[in-house]
Image (cartoon, rainbow, N blue to C red):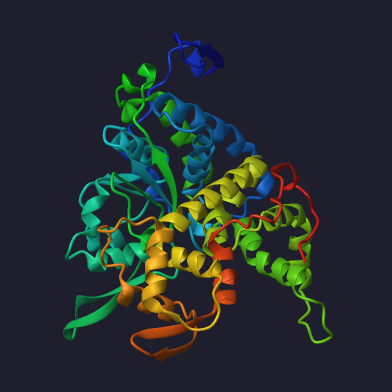
Amino acid sequence: MVWKKTTRQTQSEEPLEEYDFQEKPKRYPKKKTLKKEVKEVKEEMNDMTEEEVKKDLKGILNKITIILRKYMDLEEDSYLLIGIWIIGTYFHQSFRSYPYLFFNAMKGSGKSRVLNLITMLSKNGIVLNSLTEAVLFRTKGTLGIDEFEGVGRKGNENLRELLNSAYKKTGKVFRMKKVTGKEGESQEVEEFEVYRPIIMANIWGMDDTLGDRCIQLILEKSVKKRVVKLMEDFEHNFQIMEVVDLISKRVGSCGSFKFLLECTQNWNSFVMDTHTSTTTDSSPTSTTSTTSINNNSILYNKINNIGLLGRDLELFFPLFLISDICGKLDKMLEISVKIVKERKEKDVYESFDVQVYDYISSYKAEGFTRVSNLTEGFRTFAGLEDKEDQWINTRWFGKAIKRLKLIKEKKRSNGMLVVLDIDKAKEKIKIFKEPETEEEIPIEKIGGQNKLE
């Protein structure tokens, strides 16, 4: 089959890149059949080198982003992010954790279409409107959860706990299973792994705990006619089937990739070598580890230099490795910095605990201060109206500064008086708020190989 790249443009809209065929396309099986064939292949460790995988994935990523642009109207950066995430579903067993993808969708924005398309392109993808515990841990593959609001209802506590752990390989579920043998019936323990790629969408957002495991994107209602007039022909679309067939045959039947596992494992050695002073009693790094670090030094230094920490680094790290294979690492680093910065700014305004840190860090008075006066000052600082959020009262604020350990001393004298730990508040707010005096690292310098001390 001969591919010919063409450009089509409609009035007042940007060009759309598509594929035309110079001969009648061959028929591809429905994805259900294709996925069933892939699923039956036993997943094993794959010894393909990074260079071998690179040859396939660069072209596959380009085809995926073309399909996404055809059916979805998103910010420009989102197409690359989603494309990398989709490819990563075929490699996710190579990572210790894999981020959830969450769309905070406006009404009528096409969230069901987005879920259906992304799961169709992902490894063994399915979309469910009603999710139970058993379905979550007894099925495999990429899971799309539509109408996600139902997960927060009363009675779904166990389901939420499983979702909170399913982004990481450490999540396990144990159930007792009845077995029949020569000696009669008995019970044995059955183990399930809940780790899997998950994409979710709803209108009202999600709780902070689960949201902390997600990369969140905003899905707005599109006004582009060439997008909203298209029907969902995903199961019979030969472009989609071509991509799924190609990636499934090359890497889809594999479990873990050796070079990705080694790259992930040796990151810790790189961090220790970079951020720990050399001492006489430091443990020697193995020859194999040293060789791997040297081979990935450019990759490691680029990731290190953007300054992501903790959960943010954990979520984006798999996407960095996949984007590096696809030749898009620098752009993915830029996107991650932007997303994390926007989320931190949002947390400052939406999380009252963060606002307490912010308020106390800017507090000028020294010595004992009445908690009632602090509460009034905080309500003004947070921009709360007189009758708004009455639960944020003196009792709540007193518990908040105690929970956050911002009290140096306290005493009672016609009410509670406290001495605040302002220095601690100033240190804590740096975690959530971009420092105003510190110069940001220019994106164009991300590629530098200088180690951060």
Residue occupying the far right of the picture: 280
**From the viewer's perspective, is 31 left or right of 256?**
left
Give x and y (percent) for residue 418: 45, 84
Residue 230 in the image, given as x and y percentages of width and height: 33, 20
- Name which residue lies at 65% across and 58% down: 307
Left or right: residue 432 versus residue 100 is right
Quadrant assignment, res 182: bottom left
- 136 left or right, relative to 270: left
Q: Position of residue 279 (x, y in %)?
A: 82, 82
Q: Residue lying farthest front?
A: 414
- Which one is in front, 426 or 282? 426
Q: Is residue 168 visible?
A: no
Residue 83: give x, y in percent of width and height: 50, 39
Number of labels in the image equals 0
**Viewer-closest of 364 and 29:** 364
In percent of the image, x 26 and y 64: which residue is there? 390
Residue at image position (35%, 55%) is 140
Toward the top, the furthest residue is 11
Evaluate whether residue 395 shows in this view.
yes
In the picture, which quadrant includes the C terminus?
bottom right
Q: Of 233 and 83, which appears nearest the observer?
A: 83
Residue 63, above or below 164: above
**In the rendered view, would you say 269 is above or below 93?**
below
Q: Quadrant of residue 52?
A: top right
Side of 424 relative to 178 (left or right): right
- Tell me which corner region of the image, top left, top right, bottom left or bottom right, holds residue 258: bottom right
